């Protein structure tokens, strides 16, 4: 039978009040156990202070990451924990270089284009989650959600304000371009975002077609203006020749849990 160790004594009411007043919730949570450990191991006062401040800093960092992840709109689950790098046609050295996130500091663009099911969305979304874990801000959109954003702000003529807020994030993800027909509003939204972010913020875009074919999706003049800004400082990855992950999993019976 396992005997649980006794719980450390609670903090005094006065100390509780002070920590609440100073808004130090993570120190307040960790302090009873840290103080008990410090007494038992005869820590120096400076060591106790360091451990408590580290708990507060770590707690705040994790809370910030959770807040940024919620605000990003990123779909859950598509992280590098579930990514299988050896099954991707993206060269290993390219995957490694992109995962350093150094290209964000240079406001460069990433375009991943290829057929459906070749891991495009998973890769750029995993980069988005990685960026958040490393202290960056991220926002995720499809062309449809961009069009919805513009419709909301067109009514009160606050589009410029909405764009300004959007490009304050370190990385803008635009997913699944070319998968569905592109409305006039969506085409305009894409151009405005690409134009506003040009040489200021990084964009990672996944597309079923190469950007050189965007004139099939939107008016030629708008497509040309969008593509020249998008590709000027871009890393372009083509996933042609990549078998569909989804079809491969379905064929292998890995798309669902076995029925029992």
Image: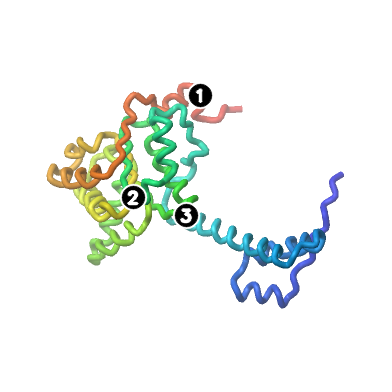
The N terminus, quarter of image:
top right
Viewer-nearest residue: 157 or 237: 237
Image quadrant of residue 220?
top left
Structural crowding at the residue carrying mark 2, measured as other residues with C-alpha within 10 Å and reported as few (<14), some (14–19) or many (≥20): few
Residue drawn at (37%, 54%) of the image: 170
Task: Give the image location of residue 195, x and y in percent.
Answer: 23, 53
Task: Give the image location of residue 127, x and y in percent.
Answer: 43, 43
Structural crowding at the residue carrying mark 1, measured as other residues with C-alpha within 10 Å and reported as few (<14), some (14–19) or many (≥20): few
Which label sits in the foreground, 2 or 1? 2
Which label sits in the foreground, 2 or 3? 2
The C terminus, quarter of image:
top right
Residue drawn at (24%, 42%) of the image: 231
Viewer-nearest residue: 231 or 212: 231
Residue drawn at (51%, 36%) of the image: 82
Image quadrant of residue 242?
top left
Compared across the picture, whether 190 is left or right of 71 comes to left
Report which residue position mark 3 lands on. Answer: 135
Q: Are marks 3 and 1 in contact (CB under 8 Å)?
A: no
Task: Give the image location of residue 4, x and y in percent.
Answer: 82, 52
Report which residue position mark 1 lands on. Answer: 253
The numbered mark at residue 78 is: none
Report which residue position mark 2 lands on. Answer: 106
Cα separation between marks 3 and 1: 38 Å
Tell which residue pokes out farthest to the right in this image: 1
Cα separation between marks 2 and 3: 16 Å
* Secondary element at image label 2: loop
């Amino acid at each position: 039978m396992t005997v649980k160790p006794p719980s450390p004594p609670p903090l005094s009411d006065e100390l509780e009040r002070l920590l609440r007043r100073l808004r130090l919730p993570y120190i307040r949570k960790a302090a009873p156990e840290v103080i008990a450990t410090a007494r038992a191991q005869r820590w120096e006062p400076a060591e106790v202070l360091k451990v408590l401040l580290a708990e507060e800093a770590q707690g705040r960092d994790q809370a910030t990451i959770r807040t940024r992840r919620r605000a990003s709109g990123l779909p859950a689950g598509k992280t590098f924990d579930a990514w299988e790098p050896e099954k991707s046609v993206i060269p290993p050295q390219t995957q490694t270089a992109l995962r350093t996130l150094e290209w964000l500091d240079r406001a460069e663009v990433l375009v991943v284009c290829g057929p459906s099911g070749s891991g495009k969305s998973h890769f750029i979304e995993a980069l988005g989650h990685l960026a958040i874990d490393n202290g960056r801000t991220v926002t995720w959109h499809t062309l449809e959600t961009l069009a919805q954003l513009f419709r909301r702000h067109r009514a009160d003529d606050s589009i410029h304000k909405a764009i300004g807020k959007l490009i304050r994030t370190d990385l803008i993800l635009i997913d699944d371009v070319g998968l569905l027909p592109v409305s006039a509003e969506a085409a305009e939204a894409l151009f405005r975002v690409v134009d506003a972010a040009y040489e200021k913020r990084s964009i990672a875009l996944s597309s079923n077609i190469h950007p050189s074919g965007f004139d099939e999706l939107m008016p030629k003049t708008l497509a040309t203006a969008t593509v020249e800004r998008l590709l000027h400082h871009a890393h372009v990855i083509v996933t042609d020749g990549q078998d569909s992950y989804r079809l491969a999993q379905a064929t292998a019976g890995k798309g669902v849990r076995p029925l029992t």
